[in-house]
Image: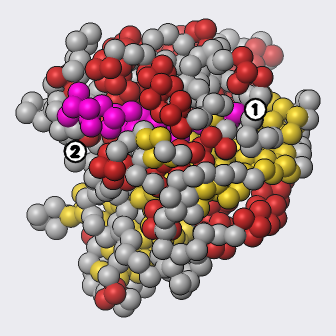
Amino acid sequence: MSERRAEANRPLAERGWVRLVMVLAAIGLFLYGLTPDGAHAATTTAGSGSSAAGGSTAPPDPGSVKRLFDEIVPKLLAEHKIPGAAVSVVAGGQQVFAGGYGVSDVPNRKPVDPARTAFFMGSDAKVFTAVAVLQQVRAGKLDLHADVNTYLTAFKIRDSYPGRPVTVENLLTHTGGFDDTFMGLAEAEPRNSGGLGPALAAHQPDRVRAPGTTAAYDNYGVALAGYLVEVVSGQPFDQYVAQHVLQPLGMDHTTFTQPHPAPIDADLAHGYRPEGGGQTETKGLYGPLTPTGAAAVTTAGDMGRLMLAQLHDGTFDGRSILDREGDALLLARHFGPDQRMPGMAYLLEQRTRNGQQLLVKDGDVPGFHSNLALLPAQGVGLYVTVNGDGEGATGGWMTQQVLNDFVDRFYPVGGASAGGARAGAVGAGAAGVVGGDLSKFTGDFRSTRVSQSNLTKAAALTGSVHIAARDGRLVVSGPVTRDPSVGETQWEQVQPGLFQQVGGSGRIAFELDGDGDVTSMLTDSDPTIAYEPLAWYQAPELHQRIALGSLVVLVLTVLGWGLAAVVRAARGKGRAGQPAARLLGWLTGAVLVVATAGFALLTSDSNALNQTLFLGDSPLLKVVPAMYLGAAVLTLLMVICAVVAWRRGWWGVFGRLHYTGVTVAALVFLVLAGGYDLIGTGQMAGSLDLIG
């Protein structure tokens, strides 16, 4: 149940929504600042393990690791306004560090204990799902290349692409082709969670891409993979993971069961978001999709055991969760359209830093953010988790900062260990700049994670990427890096279709079809998504300007006609001509303005929005689309009145032009709203190529 920052990243609850509110500021709503408190006392423990050492260099010194985290973690907690964090590091076949910082419970000031304090792991749970699937593959009960419908009996995946079924491997590489949808699939309390199979049957999303062609982060697909484990093993997923992963590794403080066992719940961290100068506890952490992270909790110490097993042929302390071949399958690259760029292992993402190959999985749920990173060549693993969304939704970025600082300290650029091959590495001949026409790479691009079936599609208004060519470089605006503070970036072409960030380490690459036209853009910051090009008339900036212009017309009309009616009444004058038609116009404008104000209110706090979408519990999620639907009906009546006005000569030429202009403004705004699935049930967008 991860909401990642790409489209931030993860679409939704990201910086793009803040900009959306700014666009809608003409109706008088403003963002407000939040300044919560935090506490950052540190506790650390030493860990041990008995797996064989691996890696090409000496492991980091435990004392140096402790000094690094004691230096950076309290500062980052204070900077981001996050209550607490836990970190663990494994190297040389053992745990070399486990530390707790800050508090797990703000009111009671309970300190974080890395060995006992359990944090909700979010999408880091997907790593356990991948392990469980591979266990069944190695046992001969699942085939990675089989149609998932081979195993499904209670329901079937719709055959949207005849001859191109969704395979088990597609589910493990985010290439199943399902539309992204997660609204309302979480619960505030574990007793309401329901079952995995019924939830998957009831909430099957559309298949919007052919499987195996394009990466698009997919919670439904991962949940389906976990359900396949249930089907072939005969055990509920949480029980299966407990018996076949947690118990062998001795992960006694980790569980996928809901409600949690009492001993784990007693030490459970509370998640928070900054609000009103303090911290508000978050909800929406339970639900039926357990394989994606619903309800799953763990400790930093326990995750050290998992990382040691992954780094050492699936074995920790003489106990195996995978054989050598199975563990190699888990960590190997299985999808990536461009070999020069990072790709997908099985639910682990390839990334690079300072010449190091990393396998990473991050997790994000309301109030909790985490990052698991393996450096297989070094035999090193790091896990960091926090219990706060952070000011400006930066909790996930803080975990990335901890990882970046660790790699920079112990594996710097040009270091002795940085010379090995790595996934996505550019060849030695890529140092120079490649000239040529860059116009084919320009335009607007939308994340494949943007939903095509509900109002979260509006994230595309501000979470898309705009690319222009200037002075032989590409100038990129949008979330192509993981750092939320980065705005416009510049890129130079170093190989055909491959660009290096000027003054940075990032890379982007473009995929071309047989005619040389761009079909997608890839970033090295997130191989779970791609960015697809938009036609000029689908450009989000164009839509923003049109929507804002229409809103201005409607706001002025509501104010102007309302004021005119008050003045006439005060002066004892009669009503203006055709009062019913004018009232209809005023009412239409008022409904649109109020609905848009409600939408702005809904999206004004990105942290709260994340929880709202998970739970689906805000009345505005239903009221706003219903109001837009009502406004659509009123607008159709306005169109009829406008036609009649010209035929019968109502109001004079200026009056008719004014009424027609207001009608057109309402109609245009509603076309855009429908295209972004904001009207009623959100079923208009599929027929509106204007939006895409």
In primary-sequence order, the first of circles 2 and 1 is 2
Q: Nearer the viewer, residue 567 or 667?
A: 667
Looking at numbered disc 1 in the image, what kind of residue is underneath it? Ala
Kindly indicate whether the residue at mark 1 contacts the one at mark 2 (C-beta within 8 angstroms): no
- For the rendered model, the colour scheme is secondary structure
Residue 133, x across and y down, in percent: 34, 33
For residue 212, the mark is 2
Residue 28 at what x, y percent from top left? 72, 37
x 39%, y 33%: residue:
132
Q: How many residues crowd around disc 1 within 10 Å: few (fewer than 14), some, or many (20 or more)? A: many
Residue 269 got which mark?
1
Which amino acid type corresponds to the residue marked 2 in the rendered image? Answer: Gly
**Spot occupied by residue 518 in the image (x, y as percentages of width and height):** 24, 62
Magenta span: 118-143
Q: Please name the residue shown 78% across and 57% down the image.
A: 73
Residue 271 is drawn in which quadrant? top right
Q: Which residue is outermost to the left? A: 163
Q: Say left or right for 623 vs 391.
A: left
Q: Residue at x 63, y 73 (%)?
A: 410
- Residue 150 visible in the shown view: yes
* Residue 645 visible to an observer of this rendering: no
Secondary structure under the numbered disc 1 in the rendered image: loop
Instruction: Judge by depth and name the residue closer to the eye, 517 or 91.
Output: 91
x, y percent for residue 359: 46, 57
